[in-house]
Image (tube, rainbow, N blue to C red):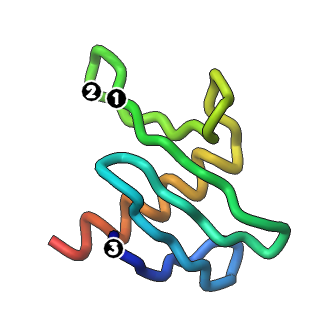
Amino acid sequence: MNTFQIQYQQQDLQVTEQENDHFTVDLPEGKIYLLLKQDNEGANHWFEDGKDKETEKSKAVGLAIERYLNNKQ
């Protein structure tokens, strides 16, 4: 497991990469579990665990995770 910090709405959030494409994010209101999926055109989509579509929050947090991971490389 890899743990790191991201910026979201001017706050530092702790993120734990559980396994490939699965992340736990500690938000002030509680933990959320995000799953990264790619569509058939290669675009990334971020889903909260158990939900069947991307939300504004999951997309924004997911993009912050992507920025961190891309800068790490």
- Label 2, on which residue? 42
User: Callout 1 environment at 10 Å: few (<14), some (14 to 19), or many (20+)?
Assistant: few
- Residue that extends furthest to the left in the rendered view of this protein: 73
Q: Residue at x 61, y 78 (%)?
A: 13
Asked if labels 3 and 2 touch by Cβ distance under 8 angstroms, the answer is no
Determine contact: label 2, label 1, CB under 8 Å. Answer: yes
Q: Which mark is residue 38?
A: 1
On screen, 8 above or below 4? above
- Could you tell me which quadrant the N terminus lies in? bottom left
Q: Which residue is mark 3?
A: 2
Identify the residue at image location x=58%, y=45%. Answer: 59
Amino acid of disc 3: Asn
Location of residue 10 in the rendering, given as x and y in whole percent from the top left corner? 68, 82
Element under label 1?
strand
**Quadrant of the rendered image containing residue 65:** bottom left
Q: Give the residue type at disc 1.
A: Gln
